[in-house]
Amino acid sequence: MICQICKKNEATVIIIKDMESNRKELYVCSHCAHHLLGSAVSSFSFSQYNINEILENLLNPVGKYGQGKNITGLNERLKCSDCGMDYQEFTQSGKLGCRHCYEYFRERLKPLLDNLHGHSKHTGKVPLNIKEKCNRMKRIKEIKDEMEESIRKEEYEKAAELRDMIIKEEKRLKKVNNE
């Protein structure tokens, strides 16, 4: 496939923008990818199709992510005491050996996850048919907390208004559950 930007070179990079139900793909050459994404792609070698090399570059953050040191170049060889996998093996395969590896390699995985995803906390996705129900339940809890605070402060009129809001939200929740 030809680069969708310069229309000259072979496209070796796919840039995917995925926002909820809207997914867009852009097929570009390495030169155009570098201009579009800047330093985010500078450590990759797009001219080669060796996934292991790309994976190793991805898993060995250098510079600002490793305070100027190559993370796998640190003196100690950190090893998971449960499965025996060391970080070097992880960089080769791209897969952790067991659930305990996340704890053993936490210090090295956090910059990697921050670099890849922008954060290292898993937020997950909520199916659309459950999302409204979760939002309603969260809102009810917030109102209940606010009502308890109003009662504690002896603001009974405000507490009564909040009680009425809870009743309305619970009716809406019941309606959502019935659909």
Image (spheres, rainbow, N blue to C red):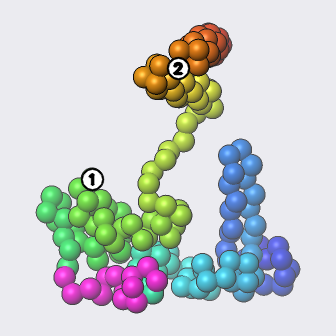
Figure check: 10 above or below 16: below
Q: Is residue 66 magenta?
A: yes
**Residue 100 image position (x, y, % from top left):** 23, 56
Give the CA distance from mark 1 to mark 2: 49 Å
Disc 2, SS: loop
**Residue 25 marker:** none
Residue depicted at x 19% and y 82%: 76
- Decide which of 11, 117 is in the foreground and name it: 117
User: Is 134 positioned to the left or the right of 100 in the image?
Assistant: right
Viewer can see residue 177: no
Comparing marks 1 and 2, which lies closer to the viewer?
Answer: 2
Residue depicted at x 69% and y 51%: 19
**Residue 155 marker:** 2
Identify the mark nearer the N-term, 1 or 2: 1
Which residue, given by chain and number where applicable, does mark 1 sit on? 99
Disc 1, SS: loop
Q: Report the amino acid beneath label 2.
A: Glu
Which residues fall within the magenta stretch? 64-76
Viewer can see residue 88: yes
Residue projecting furthest to the right: 7
Q: Quadrant of the N terminus?
A: bottom right
Q: Is residue 125 magenta?
A: no
